[in-house]
């Protein structure tokens, strides 16, 4: 069997200090390197191109997801059998690319993730950052995927896996979108231990904005998959609460001919929220069912 054509994809935004080292080290383990310069205002593109990488440029910063999608498109155009993704800020060690490739070569999975939390892996990230990553991973795992590091951008994909994924997220939420859609498409995912370094100059993204964006994106995709559960159940609970307060209101009126303003407002509010959530659940369920039937 012929050796697979491997392309490394590196989304980068203002990474002139680190991109050169990442490109040179990645080239030792792959056939081609594609760097998506996501609207950088420094020399990221010039350095990457000068070292032999294929550079795809965005005129303005569009986000990690958009850069990843542009990189994937170019890699598939080049004829990649396998695509490896890693960050341009030096967090990921290109020397560990063979670990991901060896696991993917076994042929039983479509995506391999480099996990900092598996035995044998490591990370010097602050504890609060690790806690946030684990929270997001738990949200993803609740959708049927049992992973330890859903936010790792150090991954390997088979061509078939990439061609089956239709991605919509422009920002950091694309990491979890990929995994959720992989599960929906029946793609198996595996992890291998890797080391991730948060050295000086790495991870220029605001961690709070990053975390909130990923969580909101994850919640959005989960809600679209189970709208009746995600919106309908809270709506039903709100209606039950409303029913209790309406009973209290009517009983008080029947016995004392007075109405408690606070109790009535709670009943009205709970009724409004419940109806809104249940209506949303039904509308989304119908729309998603129609879309799935047409696919």
Image (cartoon, helix red, strand yellow):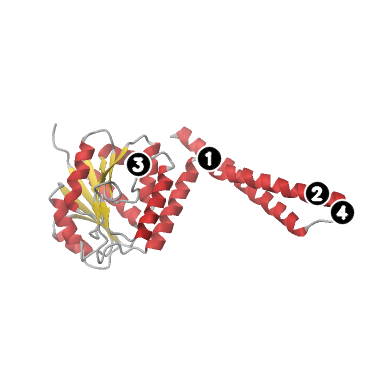
x and y percentages locating residue 273 in the rendered image: 64, 51
Q: Earlier in the sequence, mark 4 or mark 1?
A: 4
Q: Do callouts 1 and 2 mark residues in contact (Cβ within 8 Å)?
A: no
Q: What is the spatial separation of the Cα atoms under label 1 and label 3, in whole angstroms?
A: 20 Å
Q: Which mark is residue 16?
A: none
Q: Secondary structure at mark 4?
A: helix
Q: Earlier in the sequence, mark 1 or mark 2?
A: 2
x and y percentages locating residue 168 in the rendered image: 39, 48
Residue shown at 44%/42% (left/top)? Answer: 142
Rendering quarter of residue 66: bottom left
Residue under label 4, please give it: 256
Q: What is the spatial separation of the Cα atoms under label 2 and label 3, in whole angstroms?
A: 54 Å
Residue shown at 70%/55% (left/top)? Answer: 266
Residue under label 1, please give it: 287
x and y percentages locating residue 4 in the rendered image: 17, 38
| Disc number lying in front (3 or 4) | 4
| Disc number lying in front (2 or 3) | 2
Q: Nearer the viewer, residue 206 or 286?
A: 206
Residue under label 2, please give it: 250
Q: What is the spatial separation of the Cα atoms under label 4 and label 2, in whole angstroms?
A: 10 Å
Q: Nearer the viewer, residue 164 or 210?
A: 210
Q: Earlier in the sequence, mark 1 or mark 3?
A: 3
Q: Secondary structure at mark 1?
A: helix
Q: Quadrant of the N terminus?
A: top left
Q: Do callouts 4 and 1 mark residues in contact (Cβ within 8 Å)?
A: no
Residue under label 3, please give it: 165
Residue shown at 37%/50% (left/top)? Answer: 174
Q: Is residue 212 left or right of residue 69?
A: right
- Bin the neighbour count of mark 4 within 10 Å (Cα to Cα): few under 14, some 14-19, many 20 and up: few
Q: Nearer the viewer, residue 128 or 46?
A: 128
- Bin the neighbour count of mark 2 within 10 Å (Cα to Cα): few under 14, some 14-19, many 20 and up: some
């Amino acid at each position: 069997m012929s050796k697979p054509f491997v392309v490394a994809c590196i989304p980068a935004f203002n990474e002139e200090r680190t991109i050169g080292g990442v490109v040179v080290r990645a080239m030792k383990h792959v056939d081609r390197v594609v760097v998506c310069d996501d609207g950088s205002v420094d020399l990221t593109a010039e350095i990457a191109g000068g070292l032999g990488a294929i550079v795809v440029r965005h005129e303005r910063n569009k986000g990690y997801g958009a850069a990843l999608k542009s990189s994937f498109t170019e890699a598939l155009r080049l004829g990649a059998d396998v695509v490896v993704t890693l960050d341009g800020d030096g967090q990921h060690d290109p020397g560990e690319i063979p670990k991901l490739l060896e696991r993917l070569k076994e042929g039983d999975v479509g995506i391999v993730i480099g996990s900092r939390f598996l035995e044998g892996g490591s990370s010097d990230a602050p504890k609060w950052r690790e806690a946030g990553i684990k929270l997001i991973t738990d949200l993803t795992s609740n959708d049927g995927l049992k992973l330890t590091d859903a936010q790792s951008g150090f991954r390997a994909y088979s061509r078939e896996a990439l061609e089956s994924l239709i991605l919509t997220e422009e920002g950091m939420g694309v990491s979890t979108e990929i995994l959720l859609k992989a599960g929906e498409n029946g793609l198996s995912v595996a992890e291998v231990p890797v080391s991730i370094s948060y050295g000086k100059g790495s991870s220029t993204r605001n961690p709070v904005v990053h975390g909130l964006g990923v969580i909101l994106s994850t919640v959005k995709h989960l809600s679209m998959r189970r709208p009746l559960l995600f919106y309908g159940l809270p709506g039903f609970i709100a209606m039950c609460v409303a029913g209790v307060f309406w009973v209290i209101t009517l009983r008080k009126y029947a016995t004392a001919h007075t109405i408690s303003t606070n109790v009535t407002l709670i009943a009205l509010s709970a009724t409004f929220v419940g109806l809104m959530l249940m209506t949303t659940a039904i509308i989304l369920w119908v729309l998603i069912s129609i879309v799935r039937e047409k696919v």
